[in-house]
Image (spheres, rainbow, N blue to C red):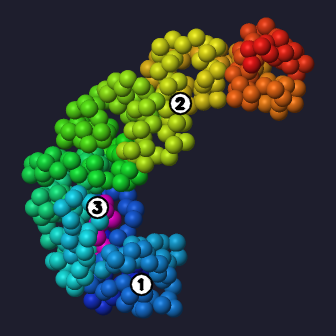
Amino acid sequence: MFIEISSNLKKLSKFFPENLYIVGGYVRNKLMGLQSGDVDLASSVDVEEVSKRLAGTDFQVKIKNLKLGSILISCKGENYEYTAFRKEIYANDGSHCPIRVELTNKIEEDAPRRDFTINSIYYNINKDECVDLYHGVIDLAQRTLRCTENPEEILKNDGERILRMVRIAGELNFKIEKKTRECATKYTSNLQDIQGVRKFLEIEKILYCDKRYNLSKGSLKRALKILNELGAWKYFALSVKQVKYNMVFKTEDRFLGLLIDIVDSQKPECLQTFLEGFLREQFGFNGAMAKRIFIYLAGYYDALDGMKNKEYFFNYFENWAYIYPLIGNKSKHIQNKYNFFYRYIIEYGLAIRLADLKLDEGDIAKKFPAIDQRNYNRILNNLLSKVFDGKISNDKKSLLEEIEKNLINY
């Protein structure tokens, strides 16, 4: 069974008389006639020996993870991840990384650590043939996603594999084999053990699963439906059993759309407390990024609630470009209403930000040293409001005079 590979890979295989294999998504996609990306390599040769064999050649070696027997091999713009055949032993806590790795020279002992049959087809570069221990080629033909071994062993220690299962089912428009699905449901609680950043990356891939190969317009709906059926959102610290998906299908930034759907389903008492905590704890966002996303969604909800134009743009003028499309996906009328006022502010050069005032904290401190600096922000916001309403002119003299009139209040 011939699979097209580069001349670099053919050259590399000459350093592995024991046999060099490609395994994983690259083989799967080639067999399906799809675009192939990352090349994962494997053989019985340990990484130290591989480094020795490739020393002084066109192939550069970089250590990725010695514990897992993993290195990166590069040559003329091509990159491959190489791992020696190994057996993995996991703790019973849902953690992604094995607690122990044992090297082996047998492909039959390496194969069980693969997740799904369609990802466990080995292509022997030296012999130009496939080694398919779990009948993955048949599952490809039947468009079925199935665990290689007993699903209990494959899914009980790794929540990421459950999210990967959802993503692949969406990307390829595959059905999930009954026992695999039942076991994924049983161990969905492992999702809460995934590191936040890794969880975010997998969710992002799921959200754009229909874009990767463009196999089905319903791929995203299918993947998100599976998340609901698995009861996955419960393990994202949500109290709702299912998320009602709506905006995620309409927004260009699908993650923001999903967050709106989560908020609409969860109905938190305080948007800021919920959203910033959710993003930090579940997806590992830093405080600044979590706050920025909160502002986008707060601007969306405040517009739907009909906040007055002046108050609205005092809060959201700087972020309108990000909020504008979110509102449009819900109500063109509301979007146009606020955008008219936004354009009016720009056209007439209205002061809408503290930075637009012809006076700053340094001017206050110099002219009124007795004023407590803790009052500066309140003073400047009061001035901005009066300038915006046309009650005072936006020049330093007028602004200082206005402060002086109200010194008793400061």
Dot 2 alpha-carbon crowd within 10 angstroms: few under 14, some 14 to 19, many 20 or more = some
Depth check, mark 1 against mark 3: the one in front is 3
Residue that appears at 15% across and 46% down:
185
The part of the chain drawn in magenta is: 21-29
Q: Name the residue under label 2.
A: 295
Dot 3 alpha-carbon crowd within 10 angstroms: few under 14, some 14 to 19, many 20 or more = some
Dot 1 alpha-carbon crowd within 10 angstroms: few under 14, some 14 to 19, many 20 or more = some
Q: Is mark 2 on a helix, strand or loop?
A: helix
Q: Is residue 307 magenta?
A: no
Q: In this view, does 237 lie to the left or right of 89?
A: right
CA gap between label 2 and label 1 equals 54 Å
Q: In this view, does 206 lie to the left or right of 225?
A: right
Residue type at tag 1: Lys
Q: Mark 3 points at which residue?
A: 96
Residue type at tag 3: His
Q: Quadrant of residue 266?
A: top left
Task: Say if 232 sits above or below 100 in the image.
Answer: above
- N-term-proximal mark, 2 vs 3: 3
- Residue 170 vs residue 406, the one in the foreground: 406
Where residue 11 is drawn, which disc sits there? 1
- N-term-proximal mark, 1 vs 3: 1
Q: Is residue 182 left or right of residue 188?
A: left
Where residue 91 is drawn, which disc sits there? none
Q: Position of residue 219 (x, y in %)?
A: 29, 41
Residue type at tag 2: Ile
Task: Say if 392 sits above or below 378 in the image.
Answer: above
